[in-house]
Amino acid sequence: MIAAERPRVQCALMKLRTSPVGMAAVAAVLACSTSAKPPAQPGEVTQPTPVTCDYEPCSAADPVPAAAAAAGPAGAGTAAAPAPARHGPVAERAQGLRAAADQLDKAQAALDNGNRNLAEQLFSTAELLVGADLLAPLARQFREGAPPRVTTPTQKIDTTAPPQPRVAGSSEAEDETDRVPPPRNEGSLTGTLQVDGRAAGGAFGLITLEPADGKWKPRSPKHVVLEQRNREFLPHVMAISVGSTVAFPNFDAVFHNVFSSSPSSPFDLGLYRAGEAREFTFPKEGIVRLGCNLHANMSAYIAVVSAPAYVVTDGEGHFAFKHLPPGNYKLKAWSERSRAPITQDIAIKTGKNAVTVGVTGDAAKGPQPDKFGGKRG
């Protein structure tokens, strides 16, 4: 299939000669093109050159290098005078097209060598240089096997906004904001979430409560923020109701690529720079693990819940509900160290109630695989 796609890549390279390029995109992305490597030694197996700068805006010289002028008249001591650097829209366009063509060549080489993740990164860089529409016929070749790509335009953000908290998500906090009155007859529930019979030890978790009869009014979807700042996600754990939309702003001076391969909500937001955001709406209940395809150390969790009552625990596993109608409930508990939630029955009486909940720490350890399922770190 790869050999069959080569003519399409060549055709795309030809089209680049006549397609417009934005100056801003060229300047931002060209600085993160591949770095020079020494020539391969005899018998050495060469690999595709990885993208340098971690998609950071490296310092870039004049985008159009000055070409050496022809030598002057013959004579001792005569030096070649450099030609003046070319500027203007034509030079900028030509430089962007050449850079995009170079990224496509390297992307094809990475794909031929079986490095799908690097190939997709290089292809994404070419898209930033010339626009995704021009390269759309090639996108499937480089993205097949990855989560569905979100292609909505990015939105500008307020870069002076304060950081998000470490954890977020409480049905009672929502009710307070929405001025929902508490039940006339109520009980409270405090408790601790343990992992493998011990204190949570810095791991955050989630507690949800569903009436045992299975009848309750669905919560209204919300619009919330989960940001990329200082090369980490904030909040690290967030709980939202089904149907809620999350904005993912980038506050860093580097590119990020937010994605999830979780079965309930797989998605890929692609590359975008500081001061921009993309959004995704979560239509199904489930635990969604987030990663950045450029930074293996970045991870976060979004718990999408349909329960009418939910709260994220603190790092020691403590949680509390202050306003619960008395009755029988299904309590579900999960920790970021757990593979899946557990369920137990609980009765809430009028007044104070307390419970200790235990989950297993059986989640996979180490960095999340890349968007194609490849091992990292």
Image (cartoon, grey):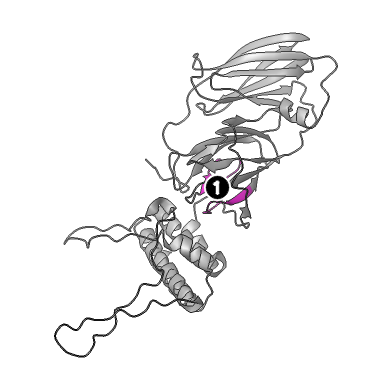
Q: Which secondary structure type mostly characterizes the magenta part of the structure?
A: loop
Which quarter of the figure has residue 63? Answer: bottom left
The residue lying toward the viewer, choosing from 118 and 78, is: 78
* Residue at 36 percent of width and 72 percent of height: 65
Farthest residue to the right: give it.
184
Q: Which residues are magenta?
A: 257-279
Quadrant of the image occupied by residue 285: top right
x 61%, y 50%: residue:
278
Residue 284 x %, y %: 66, 39
Q: Determine whether, in the image, residue 356 is placed left or right of residue 63.
A: right
Q: Is residue 147 magenta?
A: no
User: Between residues 62 and 10, which one lies in front from this camera angle?
Assistant: 62
Image x and y of residue 148, in percent: 57, 52
> Outermost residue, bottom direction?
73
- Whether residue 332 can be seen here: yes
Residue 290 image position (x, y, % from top left): 53, 40
Name the residue tied to disc 1. 250
**Toward the viewer: 195 or 25?**
25
